[in-house]
Image: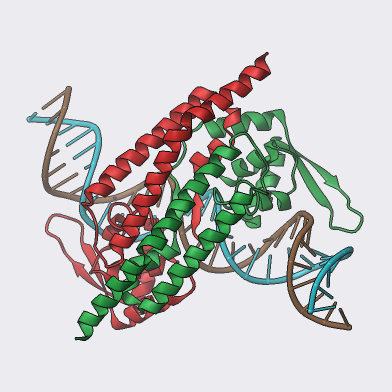
Chain colours: A red, B green, C cyan, D brown
Amino acid sequence: MDTKTLCLGVISLGAASGYEIKKAFEEDGLNHIYHTSYGSIYPALTALTEEGLVICSEMAQAKRPDKKVYSITEAGRGALLEALSAPPAEDKFRSDFLFIMFFAHLLPPSSVAKLIDQRIAWYEQNLAKMGAGGDCICSKGDAFVHGMGVAVYSSALEYLKSHRQAFLDQLSGASRLVAE
Amino acid sequence: MDTKTLCLGVISLGAASGYEIKKAFEEDGLNHIYHTSYGSIYPALTALTEEGLVICSEMAQAKRPDKKVYSITEAGRGALLEALSAPPAEDKFRSDFLFIMFFAHLLPPSSVAKLIDQRIAWYEQNLAKMGAGGDCICSKGDAFVHGMGVAVYSSALEYLKSHRQAFLDQLSGASRLVAE
DNA sequence: TCCAGCATATATCTTTCCGATATATACAAT
DNA sequence: ATTGTATATATCGGAAAGATATATGCTGGA
């Protein structure tokens, strides 16, 4: 999914600025689904405007920097539909945490324990936030995607809680054997 | 986690060529944890060699292209430990599938159904492969990471199976209302 | 009260990375 | 015989990520 499609999708739910698009991938419903950056968004919006897929209305704000609000055009809706209809690329998941866990035998068990505990706390915080369900830009698919996120995070949390101790025991057991 | 660290990690488990490093991120234990490409690996190996973190022994193979096997040095082990000790960056997850589901209301319900079914099949295949547990480069953390992967994929699969019908009903219900 | 920090808002620059492609060969299957 | 797959390295071009620059108002703590 290229950045242009990501922007087009958000704008299809309502006119938005580059700044608001970024927020949608940080706090609102698209959080955890996809990420993008200003370095990609602003050039994408320029390109979309040139292609006539969005139109830009510059809003001079009294005491703020000017805000450029983009709205989708009919051609834009067509392009979005086409992009969404293409066979989806495989999920791309990269986790520093899991990579480090893979090499946990190289680290002191106390560091590993700390990382796992931080991770558990992270899942708990996020699940609490998701449960509250405050932020969302509320498309139809939102509840479905959101529910899947909650299901997956819950199972990850449960796994960490229930396997933490055995894993740490295994690690210190192994290093104890080496020391003997 | 930059590509140099990813390569260093794999090489720390045993001497490997660029080709074998790539495979470790496709089929062996690091699958689903991180991805990388030849375009990143080969330059990274050159840089690691120049920095003295790995050494390269060129293996002339009779009837195959020469194979460059890289081994980690003591300095390399130090650099790896340092990189693994840094606070992990947040997971980066990007899913075309979930992005499309978020905009499912724009697509014909039959297309959405097809995508979900393909997804269910994908999880089933992968879980079968992971259950068999054939491929792994077997570090100590391998079982822990592998188990977490199985837990998460299982819950995703269960979620899709149990919510598929209600979601599709909701989508066609909504479009029926529009048509009336 | 003052100043730090945060939120709003756009833009660009550099480094890194991804995907595609080129090259070469052996082996298996059709 | 020919197609496809596996082994193996290397590089190019375009896309993206992350950091930084700029400007300003609001809020909260020292």
The residue furthest bottom is: B180
Q: Residue C21 location in percent, x, y?
A: 68, 71
B17 and B23: which one is in front? Answer: B23
Q: Is residue B1 visible?
A: no
At a point 28% along the width and 52% down the height, the residue shown is A27
> Quadrant of the rendered structure where residue B146 is?
top right
Q: Is residue A32 visible?
A: yes
A47 and B82: which one is in front? Answer: B82
> Quadrant of the rendered structure where residue C29 is?
bottom right
A135 and A18: which one is in front? Answer: A135
For residue D23, above or below residue A70: above
Q: Count numbered badges in the picture.
A: 0
At a point 33% along the width and 82% down the height, the residue shown is A75
For residue D14, above or below residue A130: below
Q: Please indicate whether residue B100 sits to the left or right of residue A130 in the image.
A: right
Q: Residue D18 location in percent, x, y?
A: 44, 47
Q: Please indicate whether residue A2 sits to the left or right of residue D14 in the image.
A: left
The residue furthest right is: B62
Q: Please indicate whether residue D3 sits to the left or right of residue A25 in the image.
A: right
For residue B99, above or below residue B2: below
Q: Please indicate whether residue B160 sits to the left or right of residue A125 in the image.
A: right
Q: Residue A23 location in percent, x, y?
A: 29, 55
> Quadrant of the rendered structure where residue A59 is?
bottom left
The C terminus of chain B, quarter of image: bottom left
For residue A26, above or below residue B11: below
B138 and B64: which one is in front? Answer: B138
At a point 40% along the width and 50% down the height, the residue shown is A152
The residue furthest top is: A180
